[in-house]
Image (tube, helix red, strand yellow):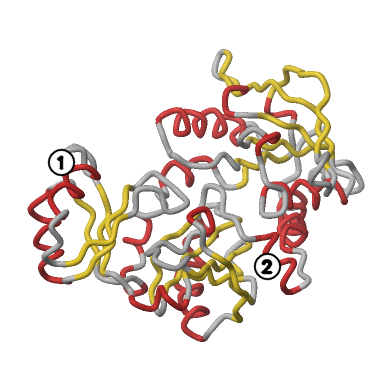
Amino acid sequence: MPAPNRYLGAMVSLGVVMDPIDSIHISKDSTFAMLLAAQRRGWALHYMELGDLWLDDGQAHGRTRGLEVQDDPADWYRLDAPRVRALADLDVILMRKDPPIDTDYLYATYILERAEEAGTLVVNRARALRNSNEKLITAWFPQCCPPGVVTRDLERLRRFLDEQQDIIVKPLGTMGGASVFRLRRGDANTSVILETITGQGRHFVMAQRHIPEISAGDKRILLIDGEPVPWALARLPAPGETRANLAAGGTGEGRPLTDRDRWICEQVRDFVRENGLMFVGLDVIGSYLTEVNVTSPTCIRELDRIYDLDIAGDLMDRIEARLQDRPRQP
């Protein structure tokens, strides 16, 4: 006889690990959209920041605060008094801490993995967050990507620039277009840029051939359990800018997925499903996949507004289905 399912007809307890909630911009914050969607289902919300997590004799614990949210830019959250609990008491934890992916972030994934082993569903899976650098993971899909190298060797980067003539160079652990440089062959600043971004050859970086179609937008395609939302947000660079990131001043336009976009999604689908990456953002420029965002993908609120969608609600549906497939003891 199958074990009774604790989740059917019961309130789900959902924890979230995120950046300070008092500093978010709710009009474009995808984590906030997820919290609204979970609250609409009557789920109990529990707020944490990275420093609220710890291990005690190998068991994952957290300092949580009950959370209520409302879609009001003047007054968007209420927090209860802190409570210490075992993370295994939570049914779901959304890991939504923004990059940089530093050592503390990686250590936190070990704590969350212990909660997973005790039965909590962590979205995205802790081990996959640790193993899936958003730039490096494109190496698993070379058929989708522009020519590129990952190296800390300055001469190798110079040779790549000589071969491609026009490249983008970026660090591996940042977000929002931070420290992204465009280099053309013959640029007088080549040496200082490469020395700076690699820390004089001490840090790995990614270089990719520049894709001229960036002028038409850097598309963010959202995947929910491997299935794409049918529309992407094309982020257009500000005048005089190479970067299209919204955080770097880009603007967003909705676009239906092309056949090539859907093909790229098919190439990635099995990998993200097998690794427990339930919410992923693909960055596509022209015909090429450039990044696979797994830490805290954004653009839910923009696409919801443009197309009258409920992307976070669709994600909560998938989470609820996953909970029903994994009964836990009362």
Amino acid carrying mark 1 in the image: Gly
123 w.r.t. 55: above or below: below
> Can see residue 227?
yes
* First in residue order: circle 2 vs circle 1: 1
**Which residue carries the number 2 mark?**
303
Furthest-top residue in this view: 57
Residue 250, placed above or below residue 264: above
Question: Given the current orientation, which residue lies at the most extreme bottom position?
Answer: 259
Which residue corresponds to the image point at 54% horizontal and 58% vertical from the top-left? 246
In the picture, measured across the screen, residue 128 lies left or right of residue 240, that is right
Q: Quadrant of residue 42?
A: top right
User: What's the amino acid at mark 2?
Assistant: Leu
Q: Could you tell me which secondary element the residue under label 1 belongs to? A: loop
The residue carrying mark 1 is: 201
Q: Around disc 2, counting alpha carbons within 10 Å, would you say few (fewer than 14), some (14 to 19), or many (20 or more)? A: many
Give how far across and how far down residue 275 sits, in percent: 50, 53
Depth order, front residue of 57/194:
194
Q: Where's residue 118, x and y in %? A: 64, 31
Q: Give how far apart the Cα atoms at labels 2 and 1 are.
A: 40 Å
Circle 2: element type? helix
Residue at figure coordinates x 74%, y 62% from the top left:
314
Quarter of the image where one finds residue 300: bottom right
x and y percentages locating residue 328 in the rendered image: 75, 38
Q: Give whichever of 124, 287 is nearer the camera.
A: 287
Which of the numbered marks, if any, corresponds to residue 219? none
What is the quadrant of the C terminus in the image? top right
On screen, residue 183 versus residue 132, left or right, reads left
What residue appears at the point 22 percent right and 59 percent down from the top-left corner? 149
